[in-house]
């Protein structure tokens, strides 16, 4: 279950870092293609873009470290009442949204259908198709913290984090790439939902 806590902010930083890293990879590929085509102006432009994105990534990473230190200091001074209040900030009532556990098999199924790995957005698109019959109206509502992200996409990313912790998805994948592990494939076979 997702609750409001400092760890959620750290995980959000991690998701942002994944997306920025994926953008850096894309710009690098554009630059490499430009070099191959001897379009040196475009290659230089891509290199400058990559430098700016890398600097931005470094700032985000530094902010994440600053947040982790701040959250640790705050947690030391928080009493039980404050902790209880934090858990209920901005939460949808229990049972209103599709539980995180419902995303497990669709994520594994999507990755299996994609050959074992895929980019974050492509995987989420497939998960959305698989889960369309079970997602609730509230799942499509935007997050209060980011109006461009529906709740279900955020929940799926939290489910991915749990799958990584359980060893069903790879931990060391490039940022923005999700990959199923052998254990994930075995779990999928045991569930009887392989392609």
Image (cartoon, rainbow, N blue to C red):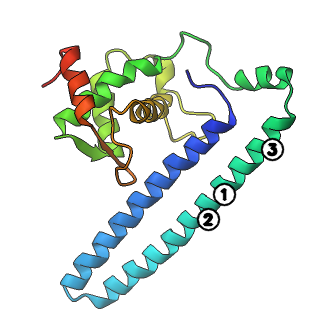
What is the count of numbered marks? 3
Mark 2 or 3: the one toward you: 3
Q: Within 10 angstroms of label 1, few (less than 14), some, or many (20 or more) residues?
A: some
Q: Is residue 151 left or right of residue 169?
A: right
Can you give x and y, in whole percent of width and height, for residue 89 in the image?
Answer: 72, 25
Q: Position of residue 90 (x, y in %)?
A: 68, 26
Residue 182 in picture, x, y percent from top left: 22, 34
- Is the residue under label 1 in contact with that under label 2 (CB below 8 Å)? yes
Distance from disc 1 to disc 3, alpha carbons, whole Å, reads 15 Å
Dot 3, crowdedness within 10 Å: few (<14), some or many (≥20)? few
Return the residue nearer the eye: 74 or 51: 74
Q: Which residue is mark 2?
A: 59
159 vs 63, left or right, is left
* Residue 156, percent from left and from top: 42, 31
Residue where numbered disc 1 is placed: 63
Is disc 3 placed on a helix, strand or loop? helix
Tell me the residue at 51%/17% (across/down).
97
Q: For numbered disc 1, what is the local secondary structure?
A: helix
């Amino acid at each position: 279950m997702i609750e409001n806590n400092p760890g959620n902010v750290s995980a959000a930083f991690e998701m942002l870092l994944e997306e920025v890293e994926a953008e850096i990879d894309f710009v690098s590929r554009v630059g490499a293609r430009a070099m191959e085509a001897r379009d040196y102006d475009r290659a230089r432009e891509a290199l400058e873009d990559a430098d700016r994105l890398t600097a931005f990534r470094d700032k985000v990473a530094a902010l994440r470290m600053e947040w982790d230190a701040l959250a640790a200091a705050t947690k030391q001074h928080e009493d039980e009442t404050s902790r209880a209040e934090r858990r209920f900030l901005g939460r949808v009532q229990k049972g209103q949204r599709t539980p995180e556990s419902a995303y497990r098999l669709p994520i594994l199924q999507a990755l299996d259908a994609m050959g074992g790995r895929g980019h974050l957005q492509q995987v989420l698109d497939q998960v959305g198709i698989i889960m369309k019959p079970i997602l609730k109206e509230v799942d499509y509502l935007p997050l209060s913290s980011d109006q461009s992200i529906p709740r279900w996409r955020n929940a799926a990313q939290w489910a991915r984090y749990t799958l990584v912790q359980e060893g069903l998805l790879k931990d060391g994948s490039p940022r923005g790439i999700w990959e199923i592990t052998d254990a994930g494939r075995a779990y999928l076979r045991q569930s009887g939902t392989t392609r």
